[in-house]
Image: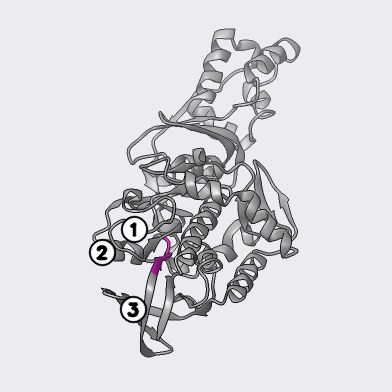
């Protein structure tokens, strides 16, 4: 069966590409339904973009690569599409936009846009081989238990990364990159919880508070969540993308609270109170109990000198921890690294060495922050490739 364009992967980037690539486009995926990552994202409401999305919110060996695609298809363009389909949405925090209803609305919108554009969708279809030919590409697939051969002038790699394998994620994009001699940057889990040995924080599982997490490269002020296995929450997920194994991190438990001034004031008014009792007014009680033996939180407020209170606050502002690792691809929201951007055109997402071969979305070495940024990269890179393909018809 001959097609103009064959897109591997019915995720956010692949479906968006199909809405722009023109007639004769076929999207294939081994899943039972399209857009499975979209469906589960944002607690089922899909954090579909971010009002503040800009190139500064992305990690890549080439931080300039994403600028072209993102300038030509912005968050406002996607919001206009969502509005046109009558999907109600709201801003949650920090510019994060969610559906009022269900993430399935975004999937349905993309499927409808694909149909309008004349693209076909094959699900439960597995790729068995890909070959570059004089006329384009020959792709062997298995569909409904039967082998089929597809040919296409253009081939788009939109199969994502390795994150959340239970959703069907594989390393197909990297296998194809190696097959076609496209360079790869190191891949690792991103936006992922930290783990600590010996169930270190198990007594605190479920405790959450605002915090600032930092390393030598960056810091994030967002919620921190203690888990049975370690640390999670937005601040942790954000920092994880900038963290390397063996590195120490700093946790500021009181980033916006003037605890030193509050404790010193209370020392004058209620000096007979236990230090831990007063501290529990500003931090979760279970956390204070956990820290008491580690930070030597003993005695009454009246017993604490200014120097002692300052030392305590310094420790609360710079709690040094070394994660033993992360939870890995099992729970990682994204894959860092991927197909090296040096191999691609930032204008079209086409490979520089093989005409008609494109790579988009998470398969590429462009990774966004938590908060809708990775979806915006999927939309922008998909539009860039799809528009370039349509322009060449």
Q: Residue at x 56, y 21 (%)?
A: 298
For the record, the magenta segment spans 155-160
Q: Name the one closer to the observer, 365 or 260.
A: 365
**Alpha-carbon distance for marks 1 and 2?**
10 Å
**Alpha-carbon distance for marks 2 and 3?**
14 Å
Q: In which quarter of the image is the N terminus?
A: bottom left
Is-magenta flag for residue 198?
no
In the rendered view, would you say 133 is above or below 71? Answer: below
Mark 1 secondary-structure assignment: loop
Of label 2 and label 3, which has the lower sequence position?
3
Mark 1 residue crowding within 10 angstroms, few (<14) / some (14–19) / many (20+): some
Task: Please report contact status of discs 1 and 2: CB closer than 8 Å, yes or no.
Answer: yes
Mark 2 residue crowding within 10 angstroms, few (<14) / some (14–19) / many (20+): some
Q: Give the percent coordinates (x, y) of residue 66.
A: 46, 46
**Alpha-carbon distance for marks 1 and 3?**
18 Å
Q: Residue at x 67, y 12 (%)?
A: 264
In the rendered view, would you say 361 is above or below 301? Answer: below
In the rendered view, would you say 4 is above or below 215? Answer: below
Q: Residue 139 carries which label?
A: 3
Q: Name the one closer to the observer, 78 or 253.
A: 78
The answer to whether residue 193 is seen in the rendering is no
| Image-based side of 205 in relation to 352, left or right | right
Mark 2 secondary-structure assignment: loop
Q: Which mark is residue 351?
A: 1
Per the image, the residue denoted by label 2 is 180
């Amino acid at each position: 069966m001959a097609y103009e364009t064959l897109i591997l992967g019915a995720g956010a980037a692949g479906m968006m590409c199909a809405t722009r690539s023109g007639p004769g486009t076929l999207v294939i995926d081994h899943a039972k339904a399209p857009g499975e990552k979209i469906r589960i994202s944002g607690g089922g409401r899909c954090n579909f973009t971010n009002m503040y999305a800009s190139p500064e919110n992305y990690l890549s060996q080439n931080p300039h690569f994403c600028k072209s695609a993102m300038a030509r298809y912005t968050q406002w363009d996607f919001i206009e599409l969502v509005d046109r389909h009558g999907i109600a949405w709201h801003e949650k925090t920090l510019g994060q936009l969610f559906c009022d209803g269900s993430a399935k609305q975004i999937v349905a919108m993309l499927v409808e846009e694909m149909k309008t554009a004349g693209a076909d969708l094959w699900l439960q279809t597995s790729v068995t081989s890909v070959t570059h030919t004089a006329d384009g590409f020959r792709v062997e697939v298995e569909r409904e238990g039967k082998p089929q051969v597809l040919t296409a002038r253009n081939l788009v790699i939109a199969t994502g990364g390795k994150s959340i394998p239970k959703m069907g994620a594989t390393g197909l994009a990297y296998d194809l990159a190696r097959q076609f001699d496209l360079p790869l940057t190191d891949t690792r889990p991103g936006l992922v919880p930290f783990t600590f040995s010996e169930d270190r924080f198990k007594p605190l599982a479920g405790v959450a508070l605002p915090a600032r997490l930092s390393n030598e490269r960056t810091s994030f002020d967002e919620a921190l969540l203690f888990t049975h296995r370690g640390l999670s929450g937005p601040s942790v997920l954000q920092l994880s993308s900038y963290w390397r194994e063996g590195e120490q991190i700093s946790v500021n438990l009181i980033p916006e609270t003037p605890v030193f001034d509050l404790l010193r004031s209370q020392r004058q008014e209620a000096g007979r109170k236990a230090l831990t009792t007063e501290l529990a007014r500003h931090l979760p009680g279970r956390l204070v109990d956990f820290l008491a033996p580690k930070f030597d939180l003993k005695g009454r407020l009246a017993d604490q000198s200014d120097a002692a209170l300052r030392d305590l606050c310094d420790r609360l502002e710079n709690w040094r921890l070394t994660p033993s690792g992360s939870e890995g691809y099992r729970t990682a929201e994204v894959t860092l690294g991927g197909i090296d951007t040096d191999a691609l055109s930032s204008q079209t997402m086409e490979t520089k060495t093989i005409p008609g071969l494109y790579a988009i979305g998470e398969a590429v070495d462009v990774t966004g922050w938590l908060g809708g940024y990775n979806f915006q990269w999927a939309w922008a890179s998909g539009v860039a490739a799809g528009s370039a393909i349509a322009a060449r018809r």
